[in-house]
Every structure is written in structure tokens, then in C-alpha cells.
Amino acid sequence: MNYALVDGRKIAARPGLKGQCPVCGSEVSTKCGEIRVWHWAHTRRRACDPWWENETPWHRAWKDAFPVDWQEIVHRAETDEKHVADIKTERGWVIEFQHSHLAAGERGAREDFYERMVWVVDGRRRKRDWTQFERAIKEGSRYLERPAVWLVWIDESALLKEWAESRVHVFFDFGFTDLHCMLPGSADGRAAIMIASKEDFIESHIRGTYDFSCRADFKRSKTIDPLYQAYGFQRYLARKACSRARSRF
Ligand SMILES: [Zn+2]
């Protein structure tokens, strides 16, 4: 964690501080070495939030693109289960930055817990990921011009296979100015990938205009195909398959 409570105030990690864990309330102290990013850690070993992953500079850079007040927010479910959301926006969107591999069951549990959430996935953890992903796009078909959306074969890429079942937006960050967003609702072995600039993504959350219901509401691209909106991805593909079948006879 970058933040803990010191005398009730949210304070970033710097050398020599002691504070209180915002999740479990026990004592934390700062670790400010040269290898890992400066962070707060429990003074005594403790099972606190099992979902918390060790932060990389990639995590920290993403979180710092948002206001401090939105970073590392304790989210509590009705069952009293508590977890720290990387970002929780004023409009209640949780943004989780995922660097390491996440098992499908774990991913689903987090989507259930946070409900209104999106993933940003580090696409540079494995070298082959961009190579495979780029090939999937090249071999996919262009579905929309604006916003740019491709239909790609999930089997082409390990990353796509790992995230295909997600019920929410998954933004892959390959280190470019654009993010590649997998829209929810893959079907028929294919997924829809939308290109969205990193800047628009951040700004739409900061301005509070990010809107899941229309699936692609960035300032450059107000609409995604009405057919897609009306029917959803799976039904869209089913209709396409039907019309293909009809045209054969
Ligand atoms: Zn704790």
C-alpha cells in the first residue's frame, strides 16, 4: 500500500513512519528501500487483505494518474467482507490494476465483490503477449471504424484466453498511448477489442462520464454500433451467423 493512516490522516509511505492499516487497523510501518516501490507493510506478519498484490512501478504510475482521495479505498460488502480497491472514483467505479496472473475463479470473485468495476491489465509482464495479441488483431476482422473495434479469435492469444470470461471491461496496457479494451460478452470463440486512448480513459473517469451501459463512452466515440448496443455481442454474432446460414440456401 502507498497509503496508511497516521493520526487518522491518509499518508504516503516515506522513511521511518508508523501508522495504522486502513483495512484491519493493526500497526504498519514503511518499507523504503531501493528495489521495491516505497510502501507500507504490516509490522507483524498478518493475513489482512489476501487480494492485495505487491505493487510495481506500473501500479503506482497508474494510481497516481487519479486523485489521492480515490486511491486505495476500503470497499466493504454487506457481508462485512473488506478489500482495498486500487481506485474508487467519485461515481463509484472501481479500477483494479492487475500485473500478475489471476485465476479465473479469483477474477470472478472480485467482479462479484466490486460490481461496478473495470480491469487494467499489465500487457508487458510476458514478452510474447503483445506478439500474440497483435497477430490476433491482424487476423481478426474490423467490426467498427469509430470507435475502432475488431473481432478477434480468442485462441490466438494467451492473454485473451485468460480474460475472455470477464463480465466487465478489461483494458490491456501494452505500454502504448492507446489501450486495447476487451468488451464483455465474448462469444463464438471471438471477442470484441476496442481501441481507447489512455488519456480518454483517465479523463472520462475524472470527469465522471465513463459509462458502462453504452459500453464505449469516451469523448471521441459517443456510440458503438446501435446493433451491438441493442442486442449485445452474443446476440449480434448469433444474428450474423443466422444471416450467413440463410444466404447459403
Ligand atoms: Zn491490515
Image: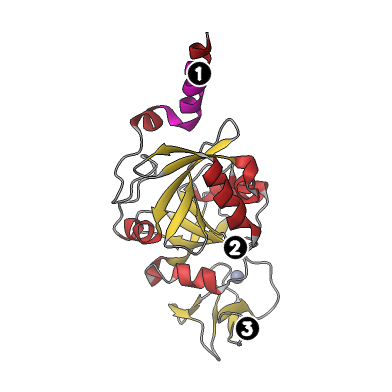
* Residue annotated with mark 2: 99
SS for tag 2? loop
Identify the residue shown where x is 62% and y is 66%. 53
Identify the residue shown where x is 52% and y is 46%. 137
Residue 27 rendering spot, x and y as whole percentages: 60, 79
Residue 132 rendering spot, x and y as whole percentages: 61, 51
* Residue annotated with mark 3: 35
Identify the residue shown where x is 48% and y is 23%. 240
- Labels 3 & 2 near each other (Cβ < 8 A): no
* Label 3 vs 2, first from the N-terminus: 3
Q: Along the horizontal axis of the image, is 114 left or right of 196?
A: right
Magenta region's main secondary structure?
helix
* Label 2 vs 1, first from the N-terminus: 2
Given residues 123 and 135, the one toward you in this image is 135
- Ligand 1 found in image quarter: bottom right
* Residue annotated with mark 1: 244
Q: Using a 10 Å C-alpha cutoff, classify the residue at mark 3 as few (fewer than 14 neighbours), some (14 to 19) or many (20 or more).
A: few
SS for tag 1? helix
Q: Is mark 3 within 8 Å of ligand 1?
A: no
Given residues 115 and 144, the one toward you in this image is 144
Whole-number angstrom distance, CA of label 2 to CA of label 1: 40 Å
Residue 93 rendering spot, x and y as whole percentages: 41, 53
- Magenta span: 231-243
Identity, as a three-letter code, of the amino acid under mark 3: Ile
Q: Using a 10 Å C-alpha cutoff, classify the residue at mark 2 as few (fewer than 14 neighbours), some (14 to 19) or many (20 or more).
A: some
Residue 240 part of the magenta-drawn span = yes
Q: Which mark is residue 175?
A: none
Can see residue 79? no
Identity, as a three-letter code, of the amino acid under mark 2: His
- The image shows residue 135, relative to residue 246, as above or below, that is below
Whole-number angstrom distance, CA of label 3 to CA of label 2: 17 Å
